[in-house]
Amino acid sequence: MKRLDSRLFLSPPHMGGTEKEYVAQAFASNYIAPLGPMTVEFEKRLCDYSGMPYCGVFASGTAAIHLALMCLDVQPGDRVICPSFTFCGTVNPVIYCGAVPVFVDSEKESWNMDPDLLEEAIVNETAANHRIAAVIAVHMYGMPYQVDRINTVARKYDIPVIEDAAEALGSSYQGCKAGSLGDYGIYSFNGNKIITSSGGGALLTKSADDAKRAVFLSTQARDPKPYYEHSVIGYNYRMSNIVAAVGCGQMDVLEERVRRRRQINQIYRRFLEPVEGIVFQNESFPGVYSNYWLTTVLLDQNIFPEPEIIRQKFEEYNIETRALWKPLHLQPVFRKMGCRVYGGKVCEELFTDGLCLPSGTAIDDQLLGDVADLLISCKKG
Ligand SMILES: *Cc1c(COP(=O)(O)O)cnc(C)c1O
């Protein structure tokens, strides 16, 4: 294989074609910003898609998580239980609230938060007299967590669940869409996600009041007065009409994108599953349907070199690959804060052995085969 002339990214934006028309409509209406008909339309389509009754669209998925925490009135010193194996965007909003994240290890099967360890964390933190304000559960790389078990544990202790479906738009659990499986659902439309609005996020909720509150807080918390009056601190988090127009266009191709991500995963499996020392993230539990946002593999280091060596090898061919998430309990910033972790070994191993493969939906099948061959060629000896 030759070095590629144009870089093969892990998960670049993939426009469907209608985005430009929606943006042109937004221009024609002169609703460039802030809000406008596209914002309303995007929210409606996300409600229709997810099955959640209320939705607000915002500047990012991270902002949407922050707003969910504020709807729950998370206070300084509160505990919020999160997986350690996730992107920092899941957890940073906990810090914005002055609350304390408590990390929970992954289960081996799905790589998502371990329900038994979640319960252990709740029992322990409660015994230490901490108020647990929320659980944030994440569908990692699009793979649904064990929704029934996580919800059962959370309900047993009367703790609300924020479902971080940033990576899981199009995934489902027992026929229900990711984003509708917790008390609050979160999507991200960042550039590398399954669809992108060029950047943005959504908060889905079952409560009209919460949706209103989130929008209120995201627009500088202006009290209903003819002049600017503020009784609480707000944020400038709302999504603009132009950004929402791109999002509407991407909704037109969402199902197609999910189908292709799953197909990409299948093609990689065909090449790589027979190879000794390669293990995929699997739909291990009944009812679980992943959008396979990224195809990810674990590499046995008796057979393959460490993932960083492989990443560098792919770089020589102008192909982007990436390590799996570095666990948050190992991140300098959270170590400094002395955050607790329950378990930790499973996600540490995922980080040590894992690699994300190029999974963008515009990639052609030939190139997928080349990537697979290149990975196989990295085998030791
Ligand atoms: C991308 C992502 C976020 C944050 O979304 P942004 O839109 O980038 O702020 C949060 N959680 C997870 C798991 C993500 O992958």
Image (spheres, grey):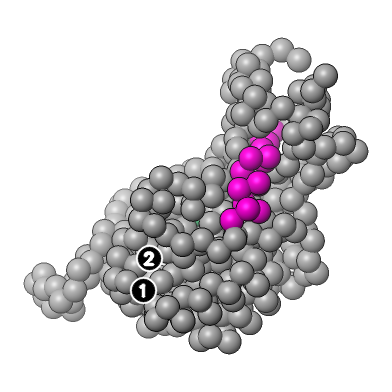
The amino acid type found where label 2 is placed reads Val
Residue 320, numbered label: none
Q: Which mark is residue 78?
A: 1
Position of 202 with respect to 232 (left or right) is right
Residue at position x 78%, y 66% in the image: 285
Secondary structure, mark 1, is loop
Please tell me whether residue 273 is drawn above or below residue 5 in the rendered image.
below
Residue 56 lies, in percent from the top left, at: 42, 67
For label 2, the crowd category at 10 Å Cα-Cα, with few meaning under 14, some 14 to 19 and many 20 or more, is many
Residue 205 vertical position relative to residue 57 in the rendered view, above or below: below
- Image marks 1 and 2: residues in contact by CB distance under 8 Å: yes
- The residue pinned by badge 2 equals 100
Q: Residue at x 79, y 23 (%)?
A: 380
> Is the residue marked 1 within 8 Å of ligand 1, measured from its CB?
no
**How far from the left and from the top, in percent, is residue 309?**
65, 24
Quarter-of-image position of residue 113: bottom right
The relative height of residue 288 versus residue 27 in the rendered view (above or below) is: below
Q: What residue occupies the far left of the structure in this picture? A: 227
Task: Give the residue displayed 20% in from the left and 68% down from the top.
Answer: 233
Q: In the shown orientation, is residue 166 left or right of residue 354?
A: left
Q: Quadrant of the N terminus?
A: top right
Tell me where the magenta segment starts and ends, as one range: 344-363
